[in-house]
Image (spheres, rainbow, N blue to C red):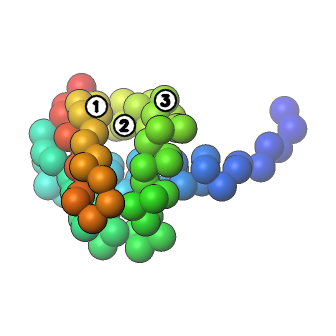
Amino acid sequence: MAFKAKSAIETKAAELASAIIRIADRESAPLNIGIEQLRRGNPRLTPLAIGQVFRKQRDSLDVALAERGYTLIDYADQGPGRGMEFEIGVA
């Protein structure tokens, strides 16, 4: 099988999934994860990047979370400056 380089959006999706999983492991699911928690874990995850990754790579996020026993219950984006939040549960 030939090597296929990941696109930037795929790399960001992996970073977002990793950040969510680290927080869920540390704080025990079910929980709500806000943008500030994600940014503390990975400053490269800007609100714009998180929104784009969620819209374009939702399936890969779901797969990565499911592999660790978590599920994405809900995602709320209240607009610029108002906050984003992921609700994570146990699969």
Looking at the rendered structure, the secondary structure element under dot 3 is helix
Looking at the rendered structure, the secondary structure element under dot 2 is helix
Q: Earlier in the sequence, mark 2 or mark 1?
A: 2
Disc assigned to residue 59: 3
Quarter of the rendering occupied by the C terminus: top left
Label 3 or label 1, whichever lies nearer to me, is: 3
Q: Residue at left 41%, top 73%?
A: 43
Marks 2 and 3 close (CB-CB < 8 Å): no
Marks 2 and 1 close (CB-CB < 8 Å): yes
Q: Residue at left 48%, top 29%?
A: 59
Identified by mark 1, the residue type is Thr
Query: Residue 70, percent across and down?
Result: 27, 34
Q: Earlier in the sequence, mark 2 or mark 3?
A: 3
Q: Earlier in the sequence, mark 3 or mark 1?
A: 3
Q: Assess disc 2: are there few (<14), some (14-19) or many (≥20) residues with their C-alpha within 10 Å of its C-alpha.
A: many
- Between marks 2 and 1, how big is the CA–CA gap? 6 Å
Identified by mark 2, the residue type is Leu
Query: Residue 81, percent across and down?
Result: 27, 65
Identified by mark 3, the residue type is Asp
Label 2, on which residue?
65
Residue 17 shown left or right of residue 52 in the figure = left
- Between marks 2 and 3, how big is the CA–CA gap? 10 Å
Residue 36 shown left or right of residue 19 in the figure = left
Query: Residue 89, percent across and down?
Result: 19, 34
Q: Is residue 57 above or below residue 18?
A: above
Disc assigned to residue 71: 1
Q: Is there any visible trace of residue 23 in the rendered image? A: no
Q: Assess disc 1: are there few (<14), some (14-19) or many (≥20) residues with their C-alpha within 10 Å of its C-alpha.
A: many
Q: Residue at left 36%, top 30%?
A: 66
Residue 25 vs residue 19, the one in the foreground: 19
- Between marks 3 and 1, how big is the CA–CA gap? 11 Å
